Image (cartoon, grey):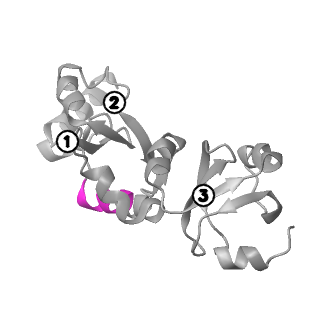
């Protein structure tokens, strides 16, 4: 039985193409076209046209890389130095901004908060009384809303700030700015 398992493993190794090796889950690689489209679409919903400032930085060039189904925002000079680290030993590199789920959908993670906050198009500020409720995962009600940026449309990506301008999260606005003014506090 052991011999047959070894033979099956050898057959698998023999038929592995160079293309399938580059797509192994443990290899840090550039994003494919479909993956890049998903990531940029998600980022665009939060930062709008400011996405150009994220991708084409003049101070230090950055790029997006995929490693073990996680997307990293990495400075190019750091990435060149990381070549000397073995693939198995590499745990993380740069800023983890999100991951691909098992169904290959991209989800932003809290690591992207600083990046989104620096380039956010729409913002909301939370009152101190509702801050902990939001941090524990509850929705933000109008009674807990301190301020909202002008002309925020419904279903737009927003970055949530405390009243002292500290980014604490991000999400999707259920109502537009005009609708929020018309609603009752609860």
Rendering coords of residue 179 (x, y %): 71, 79
Rendering coords of residue 110 (x, y %): 54, 43
Q: Which residue is mark 3?
A: 171
- Residue at x-position 23% and y-position 38%: 60
Label 2 element class: loop
Q: Nearer the viewer, residue 169 or 18?
A: 169
Cα separation, mark 3 vs mark 1, equals 34 Å
Would you say the residues marked 2 and 1 are in contact, meaning their CB atoms lie under 8 Å apart?
Answer: no
Q: Is residue 108 left or right of residue 165?
A: left
Q: Is residue 122 left or right of residue 92?
A: right
Q: Nearer the viewer, residue 37 or 166?
A: 166
Whether residue 150 can be seen here: yes
Q: Is residue 186 left or right of residue 33?
A: right
Quarter of image, res 26: top left
Q: Earlier in the sequence, mark 2 or mark 3?
A: 2
Q: Which mark is residue 165?
A: none
Rendering coords of residue 140 (x, y %): 74, 58
Cα separation, mark 2 vs mark 3, equals 25 Å
Q: Is residue 118 magenta?
A: no
Quarter of image, res 147: bottom right
Mark 2 or 1, closer to the camera = 2
Please determine whether, in this image, residue 1 is positioned above or below residue 107: above
Q: Is residue 33 magenta?
A: yes
Q: Main secondary structure of the magenta part?
A: helix
Q: Earlier in the sequence, mark 3 or mark 1?
A: 1
Please determine whether, in this image, residue 86 is positioned above or below residue 57: above
Q: Which mark is residue 22?
A: 1
The part of the chain drawn in magenta is: 32-39
- Residue at x-position 62% and y-position 52%: 160
Q: Which residue is mark 2?
A: 93
């Amino acid at each position: 039985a052991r011999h047959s398992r070894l033979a099956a493993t050898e057959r698998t190794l023999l038929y592995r193409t160079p293309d399938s090796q580059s797509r192994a889950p443990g290899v840090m690689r550039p994003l494919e076209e479909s993956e890049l489209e998903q990531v940029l679409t998600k980022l665009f919903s939060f930062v709008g046209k400011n996405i150009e400032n994220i991708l084409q930085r003049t101070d230090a060039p950055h790029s997006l890389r995929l490693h073990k189904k996680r997307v990293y925002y990495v400075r190019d000079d750091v990435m060149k130095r990381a070549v000397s680290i073995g693939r198995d030993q590499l745990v993380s590199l740069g800023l983890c901004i999100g991951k691909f789920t098992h169904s290959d959908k991209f989800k932003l993670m809290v690591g992207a908060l600083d990046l989104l906050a620096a380039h956010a198009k729409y913002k909301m500020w939370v009152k101190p009384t509702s801050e902990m409720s939001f941090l524990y995962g509850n929705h933000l009600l109008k009674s807990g809303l301190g301020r909202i940026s002008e002309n925020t449309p419904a279903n737009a990506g927003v970055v949530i700030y405390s009243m002292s301008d500290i980014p604490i999260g991000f999400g999707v606005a259920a109502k537009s700015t005009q609708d929020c003014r018309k609603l009752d506090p609860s």
